[in-house]
Amino acid sequence: MLTKCNTDATVRGMKTIPTRKERKKRRKAYYVASCGRAHVQVYRRRTPSRNWAYMVVNYSDQNKRRFDCYSGEQEAIEAATKLARQMSERDVLSASMTREQSLEYAAAVQALSPYGVSVADAVSKVAECLKELGNLPALSVAVQFYRQHHRETIKKPVAEVAAEFIKLKESRGASAEYLKDLRYRLNKFTGDCHKAACDVTTADVQDWLDGVNLSSQSYRNFRTVLYTLFHHAETRGYASGNPVEGVEQIKVNRGDIQIFTPLEIRRLLAAAPPRFVPSLSLGAFAGLRTAEIIRLDWQDIDLPGRHIVIGASRAKTGTRRVVPVSENLAEWLSPYAKAKGKVWNWPAFTIYRAQGETAAATEVKADAEKGIRAQPAIDWKPNALRHSYASYRFSVLGDAGRVAGEMGNSPAMVFRHYRELVKPDAAKVWFDVRPESADNVLPMPAAVSV
């Protein structure tokens, strides 16, 4: 019955199993490229679409066979010929190897053995890299770069990283103003970014910054905060690199330096409410930043010693400095000599409101009966108090280094921005602006509702 079954398998419509001889005949090469002792076979096969395809048998990788496929006959023959020539050259080279070369090859095999990589594979990849990079030192640099930017990271949502970052800054004694700014900017970013820190790309940050309609200065401020955040993430293993490094940097055009004239500062001081007079005079005659005034305590001002100590925790640059108190500034501050606590003892944002309100209060209405002519209100110029102090002080001293030390800036910046901005006569008048009389200056109350 078994014989009959095998015989019955040859009935019409059934294919017989080819014999070994028939299979060998069917596998006969279509073309053989020869060079020396090297022979490379090319086989031709029908594709499912009924077109011819040509397969070159490639034994170049240490007797591991692979098939290189080509759609054209001539292309396959040229590839086979080239391969046969290369294999023949290797045979010749192998036969002529010196003892040192043989030892070098054996050492290469041993070095690669733990990684399961053949010499041929290693050489092929190194040659490919050298073609792109040009030399081995560049290849080493590329490997180091890859390791730095593709190391294992801990997946942690950006919002959690931001919260951890803020908590760390709190524990290290960051100022309330800085923490408030951090929370505002990071909450705005994390509210839109729901990725893990390690998955955030430069394109993600750039697209977000481009899409939130920021001014040039706000763009820079957000970029700085995000850079600091991802630096924190990188150093703690939450990201393999800092995506903000590649984000576009925008140059802020601050325009020309604007200052107040002696007449304008006199009008501003005359119009200022008593609680704002100390802050206004400190900005005009000591060059303190608004943020430094907000942090300043009355105990930091030594009127008898004629100096103000700006501690590292109060300075923008984090560096302690001592600012001299001019004679006219001492007169403006003397009514508050016994005051305690903060110089600006109200919410920080209200000092900016006081600036605008004081500037608006300088407007003078015309009064024909009293012979008073109308005067428009003075426009409040951004950072003009500090710019004014620097300009007039530099004109008096002529020493950029000394002015820079008083202001907490670099001498180069002082020299670049404030040299020859005002004349010495105007500077003398500026530092001679004084209260009309002590009776006209009211003591500052302990607290004022705003």
Image (spheres, rainbow, N blue to C red):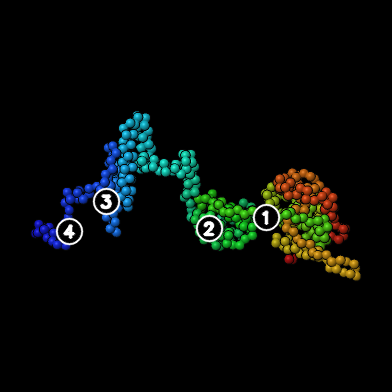
Q: Nearer the viewer, residue 97 or 262?
A: 97
Dot 3 alpha-carbon crowd within 10 angstroms: few under 14, some 14 to 19, many 20 or more: many
Q: Which element is circle 3 on?
A: strand
Camera-side mark, 2 or 1: 1
Pointer 2 residue: 204
Pointer 1 residue: 253
Pointer 4 residue: 15
The mark nearer the N terminus, 2 or 4, is: 4
The mark nearer the N terminus, 3 or 1, is: 3
Q: Are marks 2 and 4 in contact (CB under 8 Å)?
A: no
Camera-side mark, 2 or 4: 4
Q: Are marks 3 and 2 in contact (CB under 8 Å)?
A: no
Dot 4 alpha-carbon crowd within 10 angstroms: few under 14, some 14 to 19, many 20 or more: few
Mark 3 → mark 2, Cα distance in angstroms:
51 Å
Q: Position of residue 141 (x, y in %)?
A: 49, 42
Mark 4 → mark 3, Cα distance in angstroms:
22 Å
Q: Split into 4 quadrants, where in the image is the C terminus? A: bottom right
